[in-house]
Amino acid sequence: MRSLARVLLEIGWSLSGSDPRAESVADLRDRGVRLFANHAADNVAETVGLVIFSDAIGPGNPELQRAGQRKIPTLRYFQALGLLADARQTIAVAGTHGKSTVSAMIGAILRTAGADPTVVFGAEPVGGDRVGRGGSHLGRGPAMVVEACEYRANFLHLRPREAVLLGIEHDHFDCYPTIGRLEHAFGLFARSVRAEGRLLVPHACRRSRVAAASAACRWETFGWEEGADWRATRLGNRLGRYGFTVERAGRPLCRVDLKVLGRHNVLNALAAAAVGLQNGANAEQIADALSHWPGLRRRLEMVGQAGGVTWVDDYAHHPTEIAAALRAVREAFPDRRVFCLFEPHQASRTARTLDETAVSLQNADVTLITEIFRAREPLPANGEVTAADLARSVRALGAEVPPIHGADRCAEHLAHRLRPGDVLVTLGAGNIGTTGYELFERLRKDRPAG
């Protein structure tokens, strides 16, 4: 929503908006947006001509109800994004993991090549480069790069000229009770790519290849494996940062040395390179853009140090993401103690992935698990999975997991245990980043000499 707002401002719209965490989008206020910290019917002024809302907003929201009373048109976020995308040559990035990262990488490549694409994705770039502080930018060129989310099949509001499918794993259990339902949605997305376009899918993901087989457009694969149309070869690893050679149909294209952590980012960069070459970038421009790309906030972000403790913050909330994040941290800090502070995201996801999540959290010296962040979920029901259930599963596999789950108590525990040289990793898609910032401010004050 924040990224969309920034694009609409650049178009010239007059905006207001409501969010209980309005301080997190204070830059919008600086650009003339009227912000409200609470949802209320009076926030919908007489001059409002359209209300756009996110999937976090239910039908009982007072502003939606006021819009209905006044017969003001309403659009979900992806409906509005689809209208913008229809007027542009859209490149849509979908899949269970990596959407924001690959969208940002593609945007960086196209800008390096001299294009000026419109870019919309949901994360914040580190350092706030030209793509915009909120991962959004209204470009003058014809291309538009968008993060395409599968939740509620929202990506079907797009009709992309080109698309990347980064893999399919079962997720969003509140709207996809079976993996078959999710596969069906991705199959529809593959068929939504224009016939004259192209779809790019991971060679190793069977579900993605099945979805691609139903597409009307041509499709190509990327991966490490022999047989992939695009390959990452000659990998090198220096403290968690990877270099690799991009190969197209068996021929070397360029060498990329990533600044960001994680082996998984090799495949993200490979996909972005394939899109870049298709859209006018040459080998030198691709290598330059990817080798200098600084990363995104909350994506293995090296936030800083306080009291000799290094803090890494990541959005990971699915078992595959958690395992990849902790592996990357271990590679970056092989001789350090690693403390993991994890906030489970949604009770439905926690229940359905309990065993897998427990395994994914093993690669830390100490793991603390906060209460579940209940995004889009009602109050807890009797017998529902809890943070304590997950902690017992993690502990049963041999990890050290203190029996505390309140965010404040976890932070207090860490403040007493962390020592100079330790690494703290905060993982989760909810409020865990805020907990991390509060803890680090405390460490700065208590240990100024660090």
Image (cartoon, helix red, strand yellow):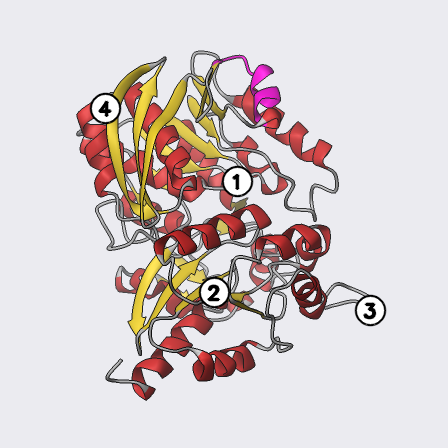
Residue 281: give its label.
4
Residue 162: give its label.
none
Q: Quadrant of the C terminus?
A: bottom left
Instruction: List the residue tagged with mark 2.
Output: 19
Which of marks 2 and 3 precedes in the sequence? Answer: 2
Q: Nearer the viewer, mark 2 or mark 4?
A: 4
Task: Give the left or right position of residue 134, taking residue 63 as reference.
Answer: left
Q: Nearer the viewer, mark 2 or mark 1?
A: 1
Above/below status of 109 relative to 444: above
**SS of the residue at dot 1?**
loop
Q: Nearer the viewer, mark 3 or mark 2?
A: 3
How far apart, in angstroms, are the residues tagged by discs 1 and 4?
Answer: 26 Å
**Mark 1 crowdedness (10 Å alpha carbons): few <14, some 14-19, many ≥20:** some
Residue 382: give its label.
3
Q: Which corner quadrant of the image does residue 403 belong to?
A: bottom right
Residue 149: give its label.
1
Q: Are marks 2 and 1 in contact (CB under 8 Å)?
A: no
Kind of residue at badge 4: Ala
Q: Nearer the viewer, mark 1 or mark 3?
A: 3
Which of marks 1 and 2 precedes in the sequence? Answer: 2
Which of marks 4 and 1 precedes in the sequence? Answer: 1
Which of marks 4 and 2 precedes in the sequence? Answer: 2
Instruction: Farthest residue to the front: give it.
Output: 335
Q: Which residues are magenta?
A: 208-218
Q: Are marks 1 and 3 in contact (CB under 8 Å)?
A: no
Kind of residue at badge 2: Asp
Q: Are marks 3 and 2 in contact (CB under 8 Å)?
A: no
